[in-house]
Amino acid sequence: MEPERRPRTLATMLTRLTTLLLLAGLVVGTVIAGTHAGKSGAGSSTPATFGPALRLSTQATAGLWCPAGAAFSHDGARLAVFGPAAGCDAHGALIARDQPHVLAVYDTHTGVIERLIPLDTLVASSLALRSPDHAPIVRAMRYVGLGWTPDDTRFAALFAAFDTPGPATQDALVASGMVLVDIATGASTLIHGDGGFFDAPLGTYTGLPVYDLAEAAVSAPFVSPAGLAFAWSGQDQPEAILPLDGRPLRQLPISAGPRYPVGQPDGGATFTLWQPGYVLGPRASASFAGIHGTTGAFVTTFPTWSPSGTHATLMVAGVALAAPPNMPPAPAATPGAGPLVLAPDRLTLAPARDAALRAVQREIGADGWAQVAWNPGGSLLASIACVAGGDETLTLRDTQTGAIVSAAPLRLPTADPGCGGFSAGEDIGDYAQPNLTLLWSPDGAHVLVSDQHAGQLVLWSVTTSDTASATAP
């Protein structure tokens, strides 16, 4: 069912005009910056290399298991993750008896813990204050991270509280909403109402709500608009400024292509769909709607915040990708098992953003998939091809040429499922927890791989020609 079309008010028209002007200014600025920046511009050849890896055991440093919800602050100086403080089950499920969750904030450069904040007690105490005579009994919790507010003062997570441990079921749900944690004081604010995040475990994707921090309210679920680039509208929800109408694209617009930055979805004016996500071969993506025999896909789920920081939601986006040259086609009638990820109802065929993404498509072939993440400028693509046997490698490619400029083995522990692992079955609800998380810091100085099974955060520093010249004596 299509969402209800809202009337175009004067405020909406002005917002769209402002967005178009901003987009035009960003395009001009990008062209000028690329002219003066030489090799450092997005889409230009960018020599880069991985530096030493900072490996942090979340158990040893924070007493935290199965790290999830990893998010950098906007200045890249801090990294927040959360997880249970008393172990986790074999699937990495974040719901069980007597497993209080902890939010840990690390200094990105030193790995030193800056803050340890208990999440469950904050939620439970707020629920008791809301209904002192009928406070619900909470025996298990689940969280989905929404990252930092744009001013870097608070961390946000969606929560669901259950009165029984074990599989997440609607009958056991006693409260849900968003918890906002003040990083400096440890105080919390709750907004009640899940709007669809946890109300139908294993149900069909029907859209996600928007949380209004100023009014402490939550919208009805809405389906993320299909598009290549987005901005927050006067209706206080993300809007496609480069919409997709279902017709295949032969060429990407400049503002969604390799010479344009990918955009910052948490507080930026405009951003593209090229956020951290998954690229899938034709057989691995066969179960997605609109996917055909020789077509793969790129899909992503990521948090986004309005520039004012008053609204937040999760976006689900993606496109079908035609197989690149020199890759054998996949039979249309051979479905494959892909990663456990959300995807839009229909995927429009579009070209890959850049040569690096096409190179990853060739690497994974028809049956495989990989995690990918672009640096903020869009000039480098980090990827992990999911392979059996725990031999995954973190690879860095130049987006203009597709050439590998640096690589580092992940060195996963024995029996670690790597990027092929997901929390499974009734424990996941609608929103699976991947074993590995791949992220760039907003300043482009670090690549993070968070590993739930190993309870480990690995931060690789990334040195480019620009950073090397900036730090030279």
Image (cartoon, rainbow, N blue to C red):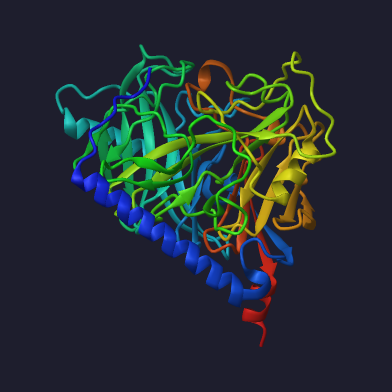
Give left or right: position of 379 versus 74.
Answer: right
Q: Quadrant of the N terminus?
A: top left
Give left or right: position of 180 versus 391.
Answer: left
Of residue 241 and residue 80, the one placed in the foreground of this image is 241
Of residue 247 and residue 228, the one placed in the foreground of this image is 247
Give left or right: position of 452 versus 310.
Answer: right
Q: Position of residue 445 (x, y in %)?
A: 60, 64
Residue 33 placement: quadrant: bottom right
Residue 103 placement: quadrant: top left
Of residue 199 and residue 353, the one placed in the foreground of this image is 353
**172 over 254 or under it: above or below:** above
Q: Position of residue 309 (x, y in %)?
A: 31, 52
Picture residue at 66% right of the left edge, 43% below the top: 352
Q: Position of residue 216 (x, y in %)?
A: 21, 39
Q: Position of residue 189 (x, y in %)?
A: 26, 43
Picture residue at 74% right of the left edge, 55% below the top: 397
Picture residue at 66% right of the left edge, 80% below the top: 469
Can you see residue 367? yes
Can you see residue 309? no
Picture residue at 30% right of the left edge, 22% below the top: 137
Q: Quadrant of the C terminus?
A: bottom right
Residue 260 placement: quadrant: bottom right
Of residue 254 and residue 153, the one placed in the foreground of this image is 254
